[in-house]
Image (spheres, grey):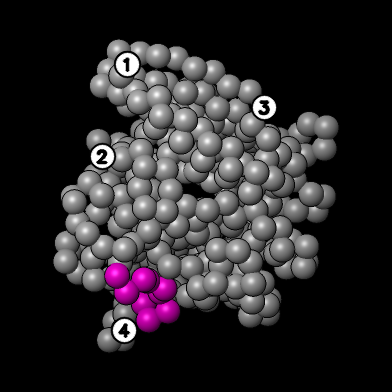
Amino acid sequence: MEHGSGGRATGELIREIFESQFNSDVLSEMEDAAVVPGNGTIAMTTDSFVVTPLEFPGGDIGRLCICGTVNDLCMRGAVPKYITCGFILEEGADVELLRRIVKSMADTANEAGVKIVAGDTKVIEGDGGIYINTAGVGFVPNDVDIKAKNASPDDVIIVSGNVGDHHATVLSQRMGIKNTIQSDNAPLQEMVGKLIENHIPVHVLRDVTRGGLATVLKELALASGLRFDILQEKLPVNPQVKSFCGLLGLDPLYMGNEGKLVAIVPKEYGPQAVQIIKSSKYGENACMIGSVNAPDDQSEIGALIMKTEIGGRRFLDILQGEGLPRIC
């Protein structure tokens, strides 16, 4: 199960099994979507969704699979256009539940401006589970080049809203803990589109999913070979999620979302980028949380350092251990 956590074990599985055999320069970039030549420049991505429970406050596996696919394309600056979906249905799956999930997919696709153009269905033995695989295609505008290696010293780090909401929602449902926390699963094409339309020179985009904010930022720091500095006091966390974490001993930095992104832009564009994200749907709690800097010594190459509220420095790493698989 640790291999499904989105942390270090997941990365090792991908590198040692898949990357070593597929031997693709594009795949080895390890971005959210692959940008490849075509009739123009296209972005492609694929994902599988196995969340438990299938429905949760604020969403369901149907909304989740569209949001996840759309957002992966958006993180390369692409305009999402087409999605395929494959269903694996276990014997005994509830037909009315399936109907609700499919309607949710259709509604979310309409919201995101994408078309579901192909699909497949298989029924297998089991206990009523529903799993969905998607693939997505989008078109990358001319002169847009967004990837992890583009981070530069003096860039600023922006997060589009509260962290940990989806993770806390799913875990609450599994544990039977009553609260009003809701998943943040949402398509982010409007937010990204506004940044590009307003000529913000976005260097890096990444959606905050499995492994949480700390894992995402650490991976970006390693990819760029720079030092990422963040401020604990600036991290946006829903008060209910913060209390939930305190109750269970969890760290919001390692809790996943499904409707938040990290944007890294030049310092002089930071305030404008924050305002653009705030004016977009699902971005009302956006804020600047840190900066990208040149390392002072070898130990800071690829480092993610958080200045704590009491003035200390905490070196953050990629999630290790199981975390909470099956949040998506």
User: Disc 1 marks which amino acid?
Assistant: Glu
Question: Pointers 2 and 1 in contact (CB under 8 A)?
Answer: no
Which residue position is annotated with label 2?
2
**Quadrant in the picture for residue 236:** bottom left
Question: Which residue is nearer to you in this view: 105 or 27?
Answer: 105
What residue is disc 4 on? 309
Q: Can residue 149 be seen in the rendering of this structure?
A: no
Three-letter amino acid code of the residue under disc 2: Glu
Assign a secondary structure to mark 1: loop
Instruction: Point out residue 312 in the picture as x, y percentages from the top left corner.
Output: 29, 82
The stretch of residues the image draws in magenta is 232-240
Of the image marks 4 and 2, the number of the one nearer the N terminus = 2
Asked if the magenta segment contains residue 234, the reply would be yes
Quarter of the image for the N terminus: give it. Answer: top left
In this view, the mark in front (4 or 3): 3
Q: CA distance from mark 3 to mark 2?
A: 34 Å
Q: CA distance from mark 4 to mark 1?
A: 52 Å
User: What residue appears at the point 17 percent right and 61 percent down from the top-left corner?
Assistant: 248
Q: Is residue 42 above or below residue 236?
A: above
- Residue bearing the label numbered 3: 117
Which class describes the residues within 10 Å of circle 4: few (<14), some (14-19), or many (20+)?
A: few
